[in-house]
Image (cartoon, rainbow, N blue to C red):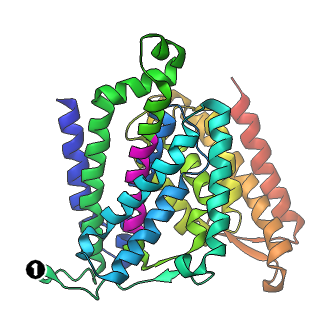
């Protein structure tokens, strides 16, 4: 009953979201969140369900995106089915690479995926006929036929296409966790030796999980190709794979919907936070470290750990972080934007990076926050 209720709430949220965030920016962000949710959920099949730390998951989503953009340009399928081509491409690549990566687990698995990911990313620059070189490969999602007047030109139509894929893929991945294969994958994560002892092949189970994850990651890549109408070799790099790892963990790899929360954070960080400050990667890294140390269950488990009686302590640490961030922003202003002057806007205030008063105020906020936060 709780599962059905959760699914209904998720579906209603996908349906109603564009009516709440109806601006062009809002629809764009929602569309990217849906795409990221599919890829992060597919990554969690490896990390959360199977205990496989992968550093090359962007290979499947990226090659799925390239396959989809080429299928779009070939105009052999309705545009709404193009993401499935990306999924098949992701699964096909996983059939080749997964056989090798699934032979080992733990650290060896991670290192093999890192090496293969870097290999594929390097090959992309050597095959400009396929990957388009620095310019990438572009397409036009409105060039084909428009059944029922759906041209996929307006962003709202793209969003609902992505929402439909997100809902179906999420449901399928959830059902996978309930299947015997999904349960055996959990067993391989917890005790692979015991799985072998009772007669199952842990390597085959890991291999099948990689193929399934590659399929859904490819669908996410295909949707991204439709959203942006261009695909470059950057989508194959280790930075993209690292982002899937980081935000899946931040969302909560131990919970099924944790990666969805991580996908929302990933889009907000990459689109909004990166536009506010040049130091956004520093802040994301600090938050990641804090989550690993104090909240390893991710943001979805954070609500259960918060206590109203600890609100003053939370406020104190927020003050400390604000003081630290103010100092970071002034350093960035002096080092990277000195030509624009010493003044920098921060949380409604105007700080002078060359003024001792601004530095003293930031240091005082940092010190006071740490002092109050550490008090019992």
In magenta segment, residue 211: yes
Seen as rendered, the residue at the extreme bottom is: 143
Query: Along the line of sight, which residue is nearer the eye, 42 or 123?
Result: 123
In the picture, residue 224 is in which quadrant? bottom left
Using the image, determine if residue 28 lies above or below residue 362. Answer: below
In terms of secondary structure, what is the magenta stretch mainly? helix
Q: Is residue 306 visible?
A: no
Using the image, determine if residue 317 lies above or below residue 40. Answer: above
The residue under the point 59% across, 35% down is: 312
In the picture, residue 171 is in which quadrant? top left
Instruction: Find numbered disc 1 in the image and state the secondary structure of the residue it sits on.
Output: helix
> What segment carries the magenta color?
210-224
The total number of labels drawn is: 1
- Rendering coords of residue 263 (x, y %): 46, 53
The residue under the point 22% across, 75% down is: 78
Q: Residues within 10 Å of mark 1 (few under 14, many from 20)?
A: few
The residue under the point 43% across, 31% down is: 205
- Rendering coords of residue 327 (x, y %): 79, 59
Looking at the image, residue 343 sits to the left or right of residue 249; the answer is: right
In magenta segment, residue 3: no
- Rendering coords of residue 14 (x, y %): 26, 57
Q: Quadrant of the C terminus?
A: top right
Looking at the image, residue 312 sits to the left or right of residue 75; the answer is: right
| Residue placed under numbered mark 1 in the picture | 148
């Amino acid at each position: 009953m709780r599962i059905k209720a959760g699914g209904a709430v998720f579906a209603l949220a996908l349906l109603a979201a564009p009516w709440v965030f109806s601006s062009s920016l809002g629809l764009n962000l929602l569309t990217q969140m849906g795409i990221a949710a599919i890829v992060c959920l597919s990554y969690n099949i490896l990390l959360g369900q199977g205990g496989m730390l992968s550093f090359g998951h962007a290979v499947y989503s990226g090659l799925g995106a390239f396959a989809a953009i080429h299928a779009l340009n070939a105009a052999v399928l309705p545009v709404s089915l193009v993401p499935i081509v990306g999924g098949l491409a992701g699964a096909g690549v996983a059939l080749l690479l997964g056989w090798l990566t699934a032979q080992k687990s733990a650290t060896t698995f991670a290192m093999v995926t890192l090496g293969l990911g870097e290999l594929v990313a390097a090959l992309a620059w050597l095959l400009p006929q396929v990957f388009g070189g620095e310019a990438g490969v572009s397409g036009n999602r409105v060039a084909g036929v428009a059944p029922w007047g759906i041209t996929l030109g307006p962003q709202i139509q793209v969003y609902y296409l992505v929402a439909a894929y997100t809902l179906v893929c999420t449901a399928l991945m959830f059902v996978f966790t309930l299947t015997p294969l999904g349960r055996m994958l959990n067993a391989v994560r917890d005790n692979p030796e015991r799985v072998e002892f009772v007669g199952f092949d842990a390597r085959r189970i890991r291999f099948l999980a990689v193929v399934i994850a590659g399929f859904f990651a490819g669908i996410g890549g295909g949707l991204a190709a439709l959203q942006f109408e261009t695909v470059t070799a950057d989508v194959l790099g280790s930075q993209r794979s690292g982002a899937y790892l980081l935000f899946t963990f931040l969302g909560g790899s131990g919970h099924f919907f944790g990666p969805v929360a991580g996908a929302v954070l990933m889009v907000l960080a990459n689109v909004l936070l990166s536009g506010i400050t040049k130091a956004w990667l520093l802040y994301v890294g600090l938050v990641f470290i804090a989550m690993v140390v104090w909240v390893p269950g991710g943001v979805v488990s954070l609500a259960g750990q918060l206590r109203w009686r600890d609100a003053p302590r939370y406020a104190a640490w927020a003050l400390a972080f604000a003081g630290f961030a103010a100092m970071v922003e002034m350093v960035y202003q002096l080092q990277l934007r000195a030509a624009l002057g010493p003044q920098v806007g921060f949380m409604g205030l105007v700080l002078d990076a060359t003024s001792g008063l601004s530095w003293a105020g930031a240091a005082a906020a940092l010190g006071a926050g740490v002092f109050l936060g550490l008090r019992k």
